[in-house]
Amino acid sequence: MFRIFAIATKEIRQLRRDRLTAGMIVGLPLLQMVLFGYAINFDVRGVSAAVVDEARTSMSRALVADMQATGTVKVRAYAASVSDLRRRVRSGEVSIGVYIPADFERRRVVGGQPLAQLLVDGSEPTIENIARAFANMPVAGRTGIYHSGQQVFEVRTEYNPEKRTAVQIVPTLIGVILTMTMTMFTAMALVRERERGNLELLITTPASSLELMLGKLLPYVFIGLVQATLVLLLGVLLFDVPVNGSLVAFYLAALLFIAATLTLGLIASTLAETQVQAFQMSVFVLLPSILLSGFVFPFDGMPQAARWIAQLLPLTHFVELVRGIVLRGAGLAELQVPIYKLLAFTAVALTVVTLRFHKRLD
Amino acid sequence: MSERAAAGSAITARNLTRRFGKLTAVDHVSLEIPRATIYGFLGPNGSGKSTTIRMLCGLLRPSEGECVVLGHPVPREAEQLRTKIGYMTQRFSLWEDLTVLENLDFMSRIFGLDGTVRTARIAERLQQYRLEDRRGQRAGTLSGGQKQRLALAAATLHEPELLLLDEPTSAVDPQSRRDFWESLFELVDRGTTILVSTHYMDEAERCHRLAILDRGRLVAEGPPRRLMDSIDATVIEIEADDVRGARHALDGQDFVKSVAQLGNRLHALLAKERSDPQGSVRALLAQHRVQGNVEVVHASLEDVFVAATRFDTDDASPVRRASARQGSQAEA
């Protein structure tokens, strides 16, 4: 215990002096938060639009005003004709074209037909999503003007205009960031000692393999908890992420996941000869983790083989845990399956590590 | 420790062998290293010095043979050995991003030294190895000599009975090397056994006993003085105006084992079996019309090294060209 503490202290000292790594430990979660929270956001705001209003009635002007009021689009220009509108979309000047036909008033009164048409730049997938959402735009407060009960606007209750993606992504982002830090930084920290010859000296000392490993990993457990806190806090402050479950459950889940990813980092460090290799290996783990864990893409669309691979990734189970706890307010008792899977992963990985790590050079 | 020092050998190795795939790095080496002595491993790079040291401290498993270090069969009881040995790797292997004091503090904790002992021991080592005014400096910014003193300070924090030093002076200036050897003798006075590998002749000469290793094999063993006295060759020096001509005269002669030029002199090793080697050389010079003064001199350790490592090689160095074919077995 005495030695573990000595190794951990040394590790923290070194980490503090390694400005780049220390900066990355804080910078990485921040950067990812901004990236995933703001930039990678399905409800982009202020999309440029052009309008052709052939109806030129007070109602048609009201419709354009309502669209702008959502903040999703911003009307940049009024086009002279439909062909002019098409040209503007094609040239990229605007992303969405709004065409209000001359018979807008008739359609409005008669019903059964869409009121207007949206011309969308289909090359940008998110823009198309916005436009699709727009087709179902509710025009609240204007029911007096529009015909009540018109089917086209029926979808309004389902529409969640903002922050939805952030709410989904932020809690799971904790898992992505921890996967990065725990596997990459620990694997590299261990391999660095081997590369620099420190390990050859350490293994001739009375410190046991277990003491060496635990001492090196202990600081990262705390770093992991700090990162998890940081991301969750930013999520609450910047994106109003609701924390519906208990914080105790959240931290327990985080600890389980940290243990699993740390052992994964240990395995990588026993395989890698150089820091570059350790880095490559962690990328090798990270990519499938991001793609297959349900972090971005839903499981339901994946082929069976991909789901099996996903089961082997600790992130998959953490995503399930953290979404359950933070968003759905579930307790640990309801989430036993992913908990046992994480524990099983850690146990297997630890066995592999102890079999591979020995105090010898051959 | 000193009362134990006299009793028995610090290291006993029998037929120690290590293979890496097809390469035999250490080939049936047997050693008997007495306590409280400085024992040297002399050999060129790749002669198996580091591999032998690593086997002795349990870092590598021998492919064949056995060794007992401080009474512990290694690698079986390598863990019990840990607190009794100090190991200095070829490369500086303390932490360059930690300060001198932090490095010593860390190593003393790893060796399990308790609070007051630790503080006292660190202070003692800082003073002993003149590192007091460097205590707050990062190890990475120290000079070669300072780094090496720090490494020795760290390796001796727990007062080991045996120090294994793998080419400790390869990155150090001559003055620091002298200081370093002074420190080693102080440690031996206190009963420590030191095994040191080197490729410097002057260092090898300072050892109490010496093992010369060549391509994994032990080719000569004994106190340096005795090795030099019992060299299996006659050493001559030729002083000549036309040194190149003199050298040419010796070329291709079977009894000439090795020739090296030192300024305007030639230093040559001749087969001992040859009767009147001096006369033979004079005759050769006369035959080639080279004026020169031939003299038998005392063998240096380098001569011992050359005689031990090169006489029986096929890949002769250009210095001796054809002269190595009929090599004698170099047994000192």
Image (cartoon, helix red, strand yellow):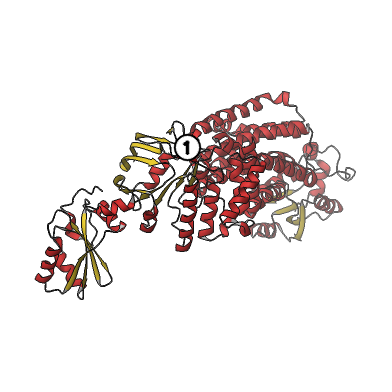
The answer to which of B93 and B135 lies nearer the viewer is B135
Residue A104 makes an appearance in the image? yes
The answer to which of A58 and B307 lies nearer the viewer is B307
Residue name at image x 73 percent, y 33 percent:
A250
Q: Which residue is mark 1?
A: B4
Q: Residue furthest left?
A: B287
Kind of element beneath mark 1: helix
The answer to which of B138 and A293 lies nearer the viewer is B138
Question: Count the marks: how many?
Answer: 1
Residue A258: x and y in percent read 65, 36
Q: Residue furthest right?
A: A144
Q: Is residue A249 above or below residue B299?
A: above
Q: Residue furthest bottom?
A: B241
The amino acid beneath tag 1 is: Arg
- Would you say A62 lies left or right of A353 here? right
The answer to which of A293 and A139 lies nearer the viewer is A293
Query: Tag 1, which chain?
Result: B
Residue A198: x and y in percent read 52, 47
Crowd band around label 1 with a 10 angstrom C-alpha radius: few (<14), some (14–19), many (20+): few
- Would you say B143 lies left or right of A172 here? left
Q: Is residue B94 above or below residue B67?
A: below
Residue name at image x 62 percent, y 27 percent:
A343
- Would you say A277 lies left or right of A9 here? left
Residue A123 makes an appearance in the image? no
Residue name at image x 51 percent, y 55 percent:
B148
Residue A314: x and y in percent read 61, 34
Residue A255: x and y in percent read 68, 34
